[in-house]
Image: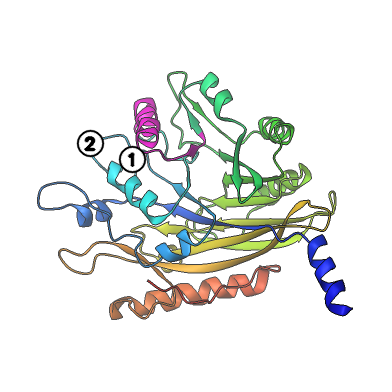
Amino acid sequence: MISVFLSLLSLLIPTDSAEIVFAGDAMQHQRQIDAARQPDGTLSYDTYFTAIQPYISSADFAVVNLETPLGGAPYSGYPMFCAHDNYLIAIADAGFDLVLSANNHILDRKDRGLRRTIETFEKNNMPYLGIYRHRAHRNSVLPMIHDINGFKIAFLNYTYGTNGISKTTDVEIDYIDRELIASDVRKAREKGAELIAACIHWGDEYKLLPNASQKSLAKYLAGLGIEMIIGGHPHVIQPMELKKNPDTGQPYFIVYSLGNFISAMRTTDTRGGAMVRIRIARDVFGHAYVKSASYRLVFTEPSMRRGDNFKILPAESRNLDPSMEKFRNGFIRNAETIFKAHNINVPRDTTDIIK
């Protein structure tokens, strides 16, 4: 009798689920360009993501912020970034399904670089968000809703600014504007979005805690009913929370900053970042909701000798060059101190990554 009851119960409880991974800022500094250069002059990023590719590709959907335009030669690092197209190919090969481009460096090669970035995304069949050729193009792209294991998930992407560089043509960039965001959220719901992920470029660089502006905007976004708020730009990690929205009664997740995904920055806190894995499920009524979230720390090992390239590793990796251990340990210590003090219901993922 009990087995019959359990069988009937299992039919009533939805088993649908999906996992989405978000990664932080994929940077491209001059040291990365120099290390990637091959004898024939091309740039190779083939080994950048090898160590964490299983974690990325194991998700049903993966998102990363590409914090550089793909503006064509000559290639450059800070302060005016421009990466080789092969960087995007490596990102795609790592398993990413969506690239974010609304960030403060997208106009580093002006409007021409933005347009070429779009062309490169489309040439390589890489979905992208946050930049558009013109207003009509934006209207044709948004709302961007992906079907992920049967869940209709909308994605949005906005930046606080573009380092004082203004567009000079009709290209479109999604800047943080509360009325615009509210309109985009409404249209996404009207088009059937069950859940919404808003990826926001905001905050103070190198600060391990969010500022008042971030908190205010996060409260506003939650008030719009957005279920996933994913922050970037500070180049260091900031806290994450999974809690119940007092307005909707549904869980929502926020990470104020994922920090750097890969970069050539050298201070302790900028040498790594976090990736988050969000699990989506359905309740007994079939409604989609954010069931759980966890984070995984990652660490960038720079080129250690001639012929080596940069690479991103699980922060706990035993394959790290010994000279990097003190930086890795310091990064983990500082990140864990912040997360243990401020995270709400978001544990660290310690499962092995096998490659």
Q: Residue at x 74, y 44 (%)?
A: 220
What amino acid is at disc 2?
Ala
Q: Residue furthest right?
A: 1
Residue 294 placement, left or right of 13: left
Residue 291 in the image: x percent, y percent? 71, 62
- The residue where tag 2 is placed is 73
Quarter of the rendering containing residue 35: bottom left
Q: Which mark is residue 80?
A: 1
Magenta highlight on residue 113: yes
Nearer-the-camera pick, 163 or 149: 149
Location of residue 190 in the rendering, given as x and y in whole percent from the top left corner: 74, 32
**Percent position of residue 188, x then y:** 68, 35
Amino acid carrying label 1: it is Met
Mark whose residue sits in front, 2 or 1: 2
Give the magenta range: 109-130
Which SS class for mark 2? loop
Please give the name of the residue rendered at 47% of the width and 47% of the height, measured from the top-left corner. 97
Instruction: Give the structural element (helix, strand or loop) at label 1.
Output: loop
Report the residue at 70% width, 69% height from top: 345
- How packed is label 2: few (under 14 Cα within 10 Å), some, or many (20 or more)? few
Distance from the alpha carbon under mark 2 to that under mark 1: 13 Å
